[in-house]
Amino acid sequence: MGRLDNKVALITGAANGMGAMEAKLFAEEGAKIIATDIQTDLLNKVIDDIKDNGGDAIAFQHNVSSEEEWKQVIAEALKAYGKIDILVNNAGVSSPETIATMEMNEWNKVMDINLNGCVIGMKYVIPEMQKQGGGSVINISSIGGIVGMAGTSPYTAAKGALRSLSKSAAVDYAKDHIRVNSLHPGIIETPMTAPSMKDAMQYYQTFTQLPYLGKPEDVAYGALFLASDESRFMTGAELVIDGGWTAL
């Protein structure tokens, strides 16, 4: 038996990096997958890999900042599988900006994707979870939502807000058997972090206490735990997977 047998998981930002690994791992553990992203070519490859390994998955092009697209994805997911047990708000963008140098359109873009997209997803998925008697929401935040990180103010602001929002939602919906937890990766080697690796590697290595950086699977296994019934008494919690960064 798989750890997610008979569960349906909706995972955003699933075309590569952590989201792709979460989709593949969840499928291996028995979940039916609704994978979404704006990068359809890469997303379809993830779906093909899942199906080639005997899994069940569908894909949708999806801009998470669009309320209408969220409604469409959820309607199609319910048509295909009848329910949504797990929501992983994984889609996000980085932002190498500080407050004094950033443009407000950059701030708004980051907030729309990293925060508002998660809000909209919860707004429309949680009522479906209420109808079915429970569910698990996993909001992929960051260590930037816990500690200050240099040179990325819009990103850390969004991730910090997502951390607090997860706690508030956990309290609001615990009575409905809906768990809401945030997951806080440190420096994970993904396509999103790749552009900063060359210039910021020394900074990353200074604060990461383990002598290596994280991989997408390190985060995916944490998400798997939060998605499964093994974490049934966890809600409003912060699962930190950061190689010791926040231990300082």
Image (cartoon, rainbow, N blue to C red):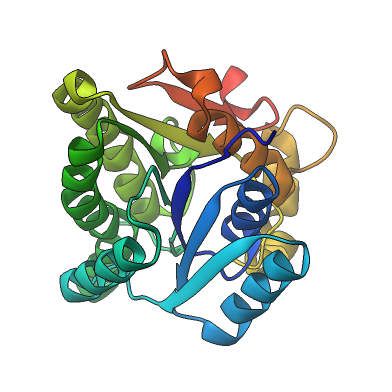
**In terms of depth relative to the viewer, which is nearer, 43 or 34?**
34
Up the image or down, 216 lies above or below 146; here it is: below
**In terms of depth relative to the viewer, which is nearer, 90 or 246?**
90
| Residue 180 horizontal/vertical position (percent) | 33, 31
Q: In which quarter of the image is the C terminus?
A: top right
| Residue 163 horizontal/vertical position (percent) | 33, 34
Q: Which residue appears at 31% of the width and 49% of the height?
A: 158
**In terms of depth relative to the viewer, which is nearer, 158 or 27?**
27
Q: Which residue lies furthest to the bottom in this view?
A: 41
Q: Which residue appears at 24% of the width and 50% of the height?
A: 125
Q: Is residue 140 visible?
A: yes
Q: Which residue appears at 60% of the width and 39% of the height?
A: 186
Q: Quadrant of the N terminus?
A: top right
| Residue 242 in which image quadrant | top right
| Residue 27 horizontal/vertical position (percent) | 63, 52
Residue 205 relative to residue 171: left or right: right
> What count of labels does the image hold?
0
